[in-house]
Amino acid sequence: MLTEMSRFYAPAAVRSKRKEESARALLRGWCCSLVLLLSVSVFGQSASVPDSSALPSAPPASQLTAANSGDVQAELNVAKAYYEGMTVRRSYPEAVKWFSAAAQQGSFEATAWLGSCYLYGRGVPQDLANAAMLVQAAAKADDPIGLRFLGVMYAEGQGMPRDYTKANQSFVRATQKLDAYSFDQLGILYLRGLGVRKSAFHAASLFTKGARLGDSWSQLNLGEMYESGNAPHAQGGARNQSYAMALKQYGDSAAQGNKVAAYKIGHLYEAGLGVKQDYGQALEYYRQSADHFYPPAQVALGNAAELGLGTPPSTVYAYIWYSMAADQGNDEAEKRLALLKPKMNADDLQQARTLVSQMEAMRTGN
C-alpha cells in the first residue's frame, strides 16, 4: 500500500523509482523497439507505448522568448516543463538551467525545485548539502514547495537528520498553503504513526483533501484505503461499495498518468473486485501502466501471456514482459523467468532471447 512517492517509509519503492530514473531511457528505447519488431502489441492490438520523441523538444516559442527576456514566471514555467516531461521532452539539465535563472531573480519556488534537483541528482551531481541550503532558504520564506521538500528531506533522512516530527511540522505548514502533495505526505505520517499518533481517520481525511485538490497520489492512497476496507467511512459497509469507491479514486489518479493507479484498476478487473471480472479491461489498464515502465504491470502482462488470460497464451511474450520487469530489478519477474524457462521449448526460448537481443542491439545501435 501507498507505493511510489511515499519514499520515506517504503524504501523498496524508493529504490525501484530511483533505479527507474536511470533505466528510463534504456527501457523507452527497448519498448519502442518491441513495437517495431512485433508490429502489433502482445495481445493483438496496436501498442500504445509512449514515445518521448513525439513530444516537442522545447516549450512554445512565446514562452521561451519571455523566459529569455528575464520574465521570472516564464523561466519557472519553462523549467517545470522540462522537469516534468509531460508537454516537452524531459531534460533535467535544461530544468536546472531555468530553475537557476528564476532563483537568481528571487523566486523561492524555483529555489525549492532547484534544491530537489540537487537532492536527487537530476541534471546536476547529487549534492545533499546544497540541496539542504536551497530547500531551507525556500522554506524559511514560507514557500509551499520549499516546505514540502523540507518535510520530505526530514522524513527520508536525506540531507537532514531523519525527524518525523519536523517532517510533520513542515507538511502542516505546506498544507496550510494548500500544497496538494503535502496532504498526501502528511496523510502517510498519520497512517503509519510516524511523528504523530497513528490515525486512519486523519490519514483518510488528509488524502481526501489532497484528492479534491487533484493530487494523484492522494487519490491513489485514498483508493488503496477503500480497497483494503481501511477507510473509516468504508468500514462496516458493503465490500462492493468500497471497491467502487476505490475504483473511482484510482480512475481519477490514472487519468493524470499515475501508473500505479492504472495497475490497481487492472487488478480490480482481473480479480473481479467491485466490477465484473474482465480480463480484456484488465489488460488495457496493465498496458497503460506498463507503458510507463511499472514493473508489477509488466509482470501482470507476462502472467497473462503465460496463462492465456484474455489473450492467446505465449511463453515468448511472457518471457519478454518478465525480462522488461527483471531489468528493473523486480524480484518477482526474475523468479517467474526462472520458472518459465524450463517450460519453454528450445525454439520458443531461442525466439524470445533473439527478440530481446535484437531490441538491445537496436537500442545501442550495434
Image (tube, grey):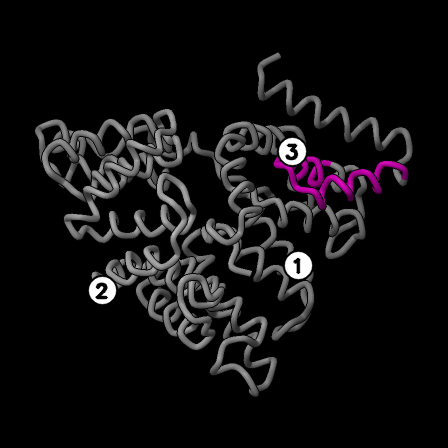
How crowded pointer 1 is (Cα within 10 Å; few <14, some 14-19, many 20+) is rated as some
Separation (CA) of disc 1 from disc 2: 43 Å
Looking at the image, residue 184 lies above or below residue 360: below
Residue 48: tell me if it is visible: no
Near-viewer residue (270 or 167): 167
What residue would you read off at disc 2?
A: 176
Quadrant the N terminus occupies: bottom right
Q: Earlier in the sequence, mark 3 or mark 1?
A: 1
Q: Earlier in the sequence, mark 2 or mark 3?
A: 2
Which part of the image, by quadrant, shows the C terminus?
A: top right
Q: Residue type at mark 2?
A: Gln
How far from the left and from the top, in percent, is residue 159?
A: 36, 39
In the rendered image, residue 119 lying in the magenta stretch gets the answer no
Residue at (44, 60) in percent of width and height: 253
User: For the residues marked 2 and 3, what is the alpha-carbon distance in whole angstroms?
Assistant: 41 Å
SS class of the residue under badge 2? helix
Secondary structure state at the residue bearing disc 1: helix
Q: Is residue 214 left or right of residue 75?
A: right
Magenta stretch in the rendered image: 320-342
Q: Horizontal and vertical percent for residue 25?
A: 50, 29
Q: Can residue 294 be seen here?
A: yes
Q: Which residue is mark 1?
A: 280
Looking at the image, residue 289 sits to the left or right of residue 343; the answer is left
Q: Position of residue 36 (x, y in %)?
A: 61, 29
- Measuring 35% from the left and 27% from the top, which residue is drawn there? 123
